[in-house]
Image: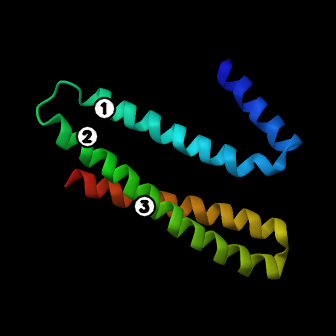
Amino acid sequence: MMTIAFLFATLLLLILFPSISPILGTISLLLSLALSTNTIIQKHAGTEHARAKILKEVGVMVLALVIVLFLGGIASMLANVQVSVRWGEVAGLISAIAASFGVGYIVRVGVGRLVKT
């Protein structure tokens, strides 16, 4: 219930104050990283070589995030430019979102294979 209220409050803030969106994006990214790191620490608490395992998983998570941000941004920019010229801005935006999700999925599969080895 609280999550839904937080979502509506965030959407209301974005509608009323559009200039706050980069700040909200940064806060949500940092909160997501903090929660993921906390989950990793709890998962490996009390295990043998806990620091090495925690460092490996956090490092892979941050590396995957950097790769997704960089490649997703480039792919979405290129898709948006090509599609919006031909079919309009809405189609360009949808193609940019699809390209970002595609890059995210490819990086997730690649990082999953990297972690398993």
Can you say whether 48 is above or below 54 in the image?
A: above
Residue at 49%, 61% (x, y): give it.
68
- The quarter of the rendered structure image containing the C terminus is bottom left
Q: Which residue is mark 1?
A: 41
* Measured Cα–Cα span from mark 2 to mark 3: 20 Å
Question: Which of label 1 and label 3 is nearer to you?
Answer: 1
Q: Nearer the viewer, residue 88 or 12?
A: 12
Residue type marked 1: Ile
Q: Mark 1 and 2 residues: CB-CB less than 8 Å, in contact?
A: yes
Q: Earlier in the sequence, mark 1 or mark 2?
A: 1
Residue type marked 3: Val
Q: Mark 1 and 3 residues: CB-CB less than 8 Å, in contact?
A: no
Q: Residue furthest top?
A: 1
Q: Earlier in the sequence, mark 2 or mark 3?
A: 2
Residue 46 horizontal side relative to residue 24, left or right: left
Q: Which residue is mark 3?
A: 107
Residue at 83%, 76% (x, y): give it.
87
Q: Quadrant of residue 92?
A: bottom right
Q: Nearer the viewer, residue 30 or 5?
A: 30
Residue at 45%, 37% (x, y): give it.
34
Task: Indicate the secondary structure of the residue bearing disc 2.
Answer: helix
* Measured Cα–Cα span from mark 1 to mark 2: 6 Å
Label 1, residues with CA under 10 Å away: few <14, some 14-19, many ≥20: some
Give how far across and how far down residue 77 sits, in percent: 66, 73
